[in-house]
Image (cartoon, grey):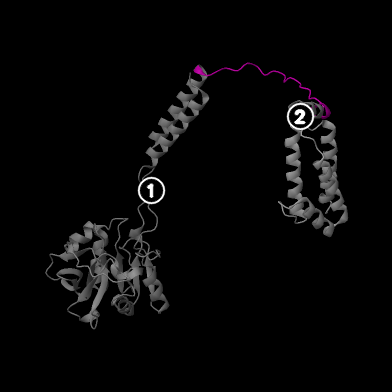
Amino acid sequence: MITARTFLYALLLTLALALSLGTGASTGTGSAPASIASHAGGGLAGVATWLRESGAEIRVLDGPLTSLPAGTATVVLAAPTAARITREEVVALGQFVAGGGTLVYLRPGAGQAAMDEWLQLESAGELDASPLVVDPGGATAQVSPARGLLSGLTSFRVGARRGVTSSDPQFLAVASAGLVPALLWRPEDRGEIFVAAGADLAENRRLELGDNRVFWARLAARGPLAFDEFHHVPPPPPPLSPGPWAFALQAVLCAVLLALTRGTHLGPPRTPAVSTHRPALEYAESFGRLLRRSRVESALVADQEQRLRRMLHERVGVPLQALPSEVSQRLRLHREELASAWEAWWEERSRLPPRISPAAWWRLSRLGAALEGLLRRGG
């Protein structure tokens, strides 16, 4: 027989399935690793903050590359992977560089199809690793030839990953680790293009290593330096299809119909029965008779002693395992009335026979209650 709990589980499962079908895999993944808003090891917040504090003008490109701000000297594409760079944006970048601008393309591992086609780029072999204590997974790329913007620089610290190469003969490998290029350079009319394998040159964890920081300082000295953030944000998801919701509504209606046809039908409400409770005194008398029949007085005596000793310890500071005479001495130092009450209780306790009668238990309880009352009133 189908129960109400089964209906509820089926309904929740149907709604979860509908939501998963509706949303799909179109949700974003949070801030990009190579964003100037990221303070992680692979982020670029360090270079942007340092350049700003050094007096450089740092701009954030939060729109397509077809509308670059006027006066921008350098555009940095830091491993964009969330959004696709279009051919129209590539044309705008070409015009920007031809007009005297500098493009720094930190190519992501998977590349960007339009950029790779324009610059004829492809991945190269693995860079020769050269571990350091502060950068165990890195490689040192030697600068050669060191001219122009790279004049006086000797090496860059990059990640030990695949390099980058180009079939365009105008590209020159200006930094390499072993025989694998890590940084390419090409003149473009009045401007120039730098292409690196990944965003390692600007990462927070490697900014202080090698000549990385000098490279960015020289770029910022040319004028406003703009970081592309637009392509670090995934495009908005497509509008939600009504199909999953229609499926969920049909499933809910089917579940309701099944509940109406197979569920248990309740009758009309009835007046609740009035129940009378037994007096508290009657309960107390019944409990007393039960104790007498059970003959648990000896266990109650031990429980009462334990409770009194715990109260003496908490309120007066008497050790739990103290001898009766020691308890009397400590209580007499504190208050004579307490000592008298304890001695009266202990004397009655010592006279109890192995088989305790109700009258003896009553006397002991009365003395214990008196001692407990003195302790509760402040001892």
- Answer with left or right where residue 252 lies relative to residue 119: right
Residue 137 x, y percent position in the rendering: 28, 65
49 displayed left or right of 322: left
* Residue drawn 35% across the image and 75% down it: 224
Q: Nearer the viewer, residue 128 or 228?
A: 128
Q: Which mark is residue 1?
A: none
Q: Quadrant of residue 139?
A: bottom left
Task: Tell me if residue 240 can be seen.
Answer: no
Going by the numbered disc 2, the residue's amino acid type is: Leu
261 relative to 64, above or below: above
Image quarter where the C terminus lies is bottom right
Q: Nearer the viewer, mark 2 or mark 1?
A: 2
Residue 199: quarter of image? bottom left
Q: Residues within 10 Å of mark 2 (few under 14, many from 20)?
A: some
Residue 320 versus residue 150 in the image, above or below:
above
Residues at badges 2 and 1 in contact (C-beta under 8 Å)? Answer: no
Q: Secondary structure at mark 1?
A: loop
**Residue at 80 percent of width and 57 percent of height:** 330
Q: Is residue 339 magenta?
A: no
Percent across and percent down for residue 15 are 44, 34
Residue sitting nearer the eye, 264 or 332 = 332
Taking depth in this image into account, of 365 and 376 the one nearest to the observer is 365
Q: Which mark is residue 27?
A: 1
Q: Label 2 vs label 1: CA separation?
A: 69 Å
Q: Is residue 356 visible?
A: yes
- Which labelled disc corresponds to residue 291? 2
User: For the magenta stretch, what is the residue range?
Assistant: 262-283
Which residue occupies the extreme bottom position in the image?
152
In the image, is 29 to the left or to the right of 85? Answer: right
Q: Is residue 275 magenta?
A: yes
Amino acid type at image mark 1:
Thr
Q: Is disc 2 placed on a helix, strand or loop?
A: helix
